[in-house]
Structures are given as structure tokens and as C-alpha cells.
Image: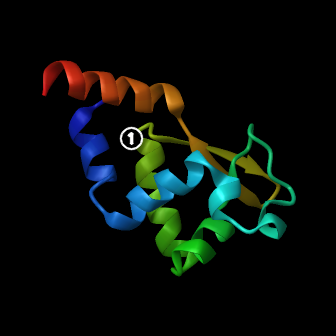
């Protein structure tokens, strides 16, 4: 984990919202959008973009930054990309902040 990369990836309110939404997808996304949801895959980019009220390309850039920082993991299935939280990385970040900052 590169702390500065993680902080940069999270330095946007929408990105923080996405991280929160992905923690409990069923609390934040309509059930019909999660019809094909599985914990192994996560939530489809188009559903995240719709929730954020932003274009898919913009949200894809956000998700890619968060994925590069290891906060999210991406899984490609057919033509769709799904994202979920990388809980181990998030726990490591919390531990690092608690112990070192």
C-alpha cells in the first residue's frame, strides 16, 4: 500500500461515497440493479455511475484510481466490469493511520 496513492484516490466526495455504497450494496442500490449481484463480483460500473449521477466514463476513471490504489478490486465478466471493496487493504490503511499518523 502506498499511502499517498490511497489518499489521492479517496480525495473526492464521490469516491468516498462509492466506498461507502460498496460496503453495503443492498442498502444503497435498488434491488433490481443488484439482480445479478454476487459478493465475488461486486457492483457493475453502470449501476455505480447511475447512483452517483455521473457518466460511466467519469466513474470508470474514479474506480480505476481506487483500484490502482488497491482500495477496490475489479472483475471483468463479459463486457461488464464489477467493483468491490478490498477489505484487507482498507483494514491495513486503518491500522496504518491508527499506528503511524
Instruction: Please state the horizontal and vertical placement of residue 20, each as a whole percent of the image.
Output: 49, 53
Q: Residue at x 43, y 43 (%)?
A: 68
Q: Residue at x 50, y 68 (%)?
A: 59
Quadrant in which residue 35 is drawn: bottom right
Against 82, is 12 above or below?
below
Q: Is residue 95 left or right of residue 61?
A: left
Instruction: Please state the horizontal and vertical placement of residue 11, each as a whole percent of the image.
Output: 27, 57
- Badge 1 marks a residue whose secondary structure is loop
Q: Given the current orientation, which residue lies at the most extreme left position?
A: 101
Tell me how many marks there are.
Answer: 1
Against 29, is 98 above or below?
above
Q: Residue at x 48, y 45 (%)?
A: 67
Against 91, is 75 above or below?
below
Quadrant in which residue 84 is drawn: top right
Q: Residue at x 31, y 63 (%)?
A: 12
Q: Give the crowd class for mark 1: few <14, some 14-19, many >=20 residues within 10 Å.
A: many
In this rendered view, identify the residue nearer to me: 57 or 3. 3
Against 25, is 7 above or below?
above
Read off the residue under disc 1: 69
For the N terminus, which image quadrant? top left
What colouring method underlies this structural image?
rainbow
Instruction: Please state the horizontal and vertical placement of residue 85, each as a whole percent of the image.
Output: 55, 41
Q: Given the current orientation, which residue lies at the most extreme front position?
A: 27
For the C terminus, which image quadrant? top left
Quadrant in which residue 97 is drawn: top left
Q: Is residue 73 left or right of residue 39?
A: left
Amino acid at each position: 500500500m502506498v499511502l499517498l496513492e490511497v489518499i489521492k484516490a479517496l480525495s473526492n466526495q464521490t469516491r468516498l461515497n462509492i466506498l461507502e455504497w460498496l460496503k453495503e450494496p443492498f442498502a444503497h442500490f435498488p434491488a433490481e440493479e443488484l439482480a445479478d449481484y454476487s459478493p465475488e463480483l461486486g457492483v457493475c460500473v453502470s449501476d455505480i455511475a447511475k447512483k452517483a449521477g455521473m457518466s460511466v466514463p467519469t466513474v470508470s476513471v474514479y474506480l480505476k484510481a481506487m483500484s490502482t490504489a488497491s482500495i477496490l478490486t475489479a472483475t471483468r465478466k463479459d463486457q461488464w466490469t464489477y467493483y468491490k471493496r478490498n477489505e484487507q487493504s482498507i483494514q491495513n490503511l486503518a491500522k496504518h493511520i491508527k499506528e503511524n499518523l
